[in-house]
Every structure is written in structure tokens, then in C-alpha cells.
Amino acid sequence: AANSTSASYEAFHQALKSAKHIATLCGAGLSAESGIPTFRGEGGWWRTFEATELATPTAFKKNPSRVWEFYHYRRELVLKKQPNKAHKALVDFEDKILSQTPQNQTFTVITQNVDGLSSNLKNFIAMHGSLFRTRCTKCGYIEENRNSPICEGLKGTENSNFDINLPIEKLPSCTKCNGLIRPDVVWFNETLDPDILNKIHEELNRCDLFLIIGTSGLVYPAASYANYVKSRGGKLAIFNIEDTGKADFKFIGPCGETLPRALD
Ligand code: BJW
């Protein structure tokens, strides 16, 4: 694309060298090239529902079976997918930063993604939780859960029509108290974990180069981070297939192509 010339890569390489505290904000676009659908735009629908309509506490209260069908479908899909070139570029860059002597730069990946495809990084913050963690709605118990299927009732529903309407007893249940469990993700109108928010704020308060990768920038609080870093004098770099806003560096194109080159 016109604004991703070799000159802009060169200028970005200079900015990477002189930055002290580099951070990223990643979104669904980072995993798009692994074959995982994004939330908005083309493919951002789950059959007849907008994905974001199902990621709410109200939807879960009203129809836990439908919401579990959605999350079961996504868990099964993600279990078959691999990190792509953009995920790998982040890991390679982290390795590079960590192998420097003296260690005079930091690199932190903040991601909104719940797919775990960045979990081989050493320093990352998954601000919206994980598809592979569950939380009990009754006793609050949280645990890792990569079972496939997560329960018998949901087995084979990945390709069925929506609305299988399972009764609560057939939905995933707590290993401690048998209560109804839910995915340990952050839905709309829910607050983020305060410890995670603190960590993010610490990071944003020192960040001098912020990479915004594959996110539409529509969902708060993440949507406010770029302006915050900018207001403190930090530089912004956008990696997206669309032009999503103002930045010092813009790499328009699939991040599986732009990110490895930019971080090389
Ligand atoms: C590529 C690519 C390729 C494609 N290469 N790029 C202030 C103002 C107004 C509203 C609010 C506000 N503060 C809070 C709110 C309410 C709400 C909110 O933000 N609403 C907005 C819609 C306006 N926020 C909340 O409720 C948050 N809670 C909160 O703030 O609590 C306090 C509070 C509560 C109530 C009122 C006020 C304060 C919680 C938000 C939680 C979001 N949860 C979800 C679901 C997570 C679980 C799950 O996955 O199921 O998180 S929603 C969904 O959106 C998911 C994502 O992480 C998130 C962001 O989406 P993302 O990643 O940007 O994906 P897309 O699809 O939008 O974009 C993909 C991008 O990739 C596009 O740009 C493509 O072009 C690009 N792309 N292929 C590069 N190959």
C-alpha cells in the first residue's frame, strides 16, 4: 500500500531502536490469518447473530445455551488453529529484546484476544480473558479448561443450527459445586480485572512506542489507549488492512506480512 513504503519501514526501524518501552495493543485482526474470524465486518457474524450480541451478560442470562453454543464453536475452532506469521514476529521480537545486553528496552504485548495464540510470549497481558478458562456463576471458581468438547451436550453442535436449547443441567458445570459455569472472558458492560487494568496503566505510563495491531479500536477501555500514549508524547504505529486512524506510522496490509518486516 502507498503508506507502507520501504522508507516508512526504515523510519520505523529507527523508532524501534530509539524507543525504551515498546508495547502493543492487539485485536482480532492479529489472528485473522490463522483462520479465526474477527468480530466486526465481513465474517463477524455467527450464523444469524452478530458475535458481539452474544458476548454480553444479558445474552447469557436470557439464553445460556445459545451463548455456550457460540463459545463451544469458537473453542473447537481455535483448538485447530496455529499461531501465524504475525504472532511469530511478536515472539521473535521479544526474544531479540530479551537477549540484549545491557537490557535497556522493554516489550509488552497487550492483547484483547481470548484465543491464547500469543501465550508463548513471556510478557503478555490478555485483557479480555481466555476462551480456555471457565468461571463458576455460583461459587466463582476459575479454572483452565481445554476439554473438547467442554461437555457432552454441546458435542457436535459446531455445525448445527443455532438454538439447540440445552437445559442448564446439560450445560458445562463447575467441578467444585456443580453450578453453571461461563467462559472467563470480559463481556460488554463488565468491568476488567483491576489487577490487569493496573498493569496496563503502568505500561501505558511509560510506553514511548505503541503498536496497534489488527484492532478496530471501537471497544473501550482499549479504544482509549492510543490517545493516552499519544497525549504523553509516545509514538503510534498502526498495522491493519484498513486505515483506522491517525498515527506516526501506518502499515496497511495483512499483519502477517507487515509485522514481520517491521519488526525484523
Ligand atoms: C486485520 C487483518 C489482518 C482484519 N491484518 N488487520 C466509553 C464510551 C462508550 C462505551 C463505553 C465506554 N466505556 C465502556 C463502554 C461500554 C463498552 C464499549 O466499549 N462499547 C463500545 C462498543 C462503544 N465497553 C465495555 O463494556 C467494557 N467494559 C467496561 O468498560 O467496563 C466499565 C464500564 C461498563 C459499562 C459502561 C461504562 C464502563 C468491556 C468490553 C469487553 C469487550 N469484550 C469482547 C468479547 C470478549 C470475549 C469474546 O471474545 O467472546 O472483546 S467484544 C469484542 O470486541 C472482543 C474484542 O476483544 C473486542 C475488540 O474487537 P477487535 O479485536 O478490535 O476486533 P474487530 O473485529 O472489531 O476488528 C478487527 C480489526 O482487524 C479490523 O480493524 C480489521 O480491519 C482488522 N483486520 N484482518 C491486520 N489480516
Image (cartoon, rainbow, N blue to C red):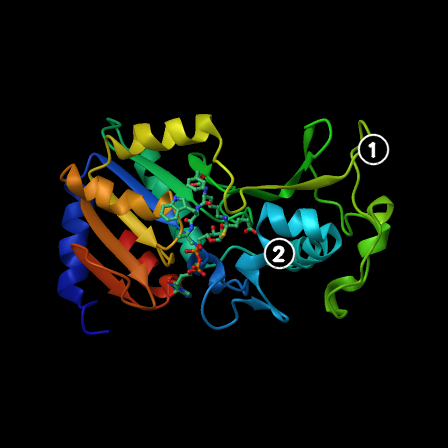
Residue 253: give x, y in percent of width and height. Answer: 32, 68
Q: Residue at coordinates 34% horizontally, 48% vertically from top-left?
A: 223
Would you identify the image quadrant in which residue 157 lies?
bottom right
Residue 113: give x, y in percent of width and height. Answer: 49, 49
- Viewer can see residue 264: no
Q: On screen, 261 above or below 56?
A: below
**Mark 2 is on which residue type?**
Val
Give the alpha-carbon distance from disc 2 to disc 1, as whole Å: 26 Å
Q: Residues within 10 Å of mark 1 (few under 14, many from 20)?
A: few
Q: Residues within 10 Å of mark 2 (few under 14, many from 20)?
A: many
- Whether pointer 2 and pointer 1 mark residues with C-beta atoms closer than 8 Å, the reply is no
Residue 233: give x, y in percent of width and height. Answer: 13, 39
Q: Residue at coordinates 21% horizontally, 49% vertically from top-left?
A: 236
**Mark 1 is on which residue type?**
Asn
Instruction: From the viewer's side, name the closer residue of 13 and 168.
Output: 168
Of the numbered discs 2 and 1, the one sitting upstream in the chain is 2
Residue 67: give x, y in percent of width and height. Answer: 68, 54
- Residue that mark 2 sits on: 78
In the image: residue 258, left or right of residue 167: left
- Residue that mark 1 sits on: 178
Q: On screen, 238 above or below 173?
A: below
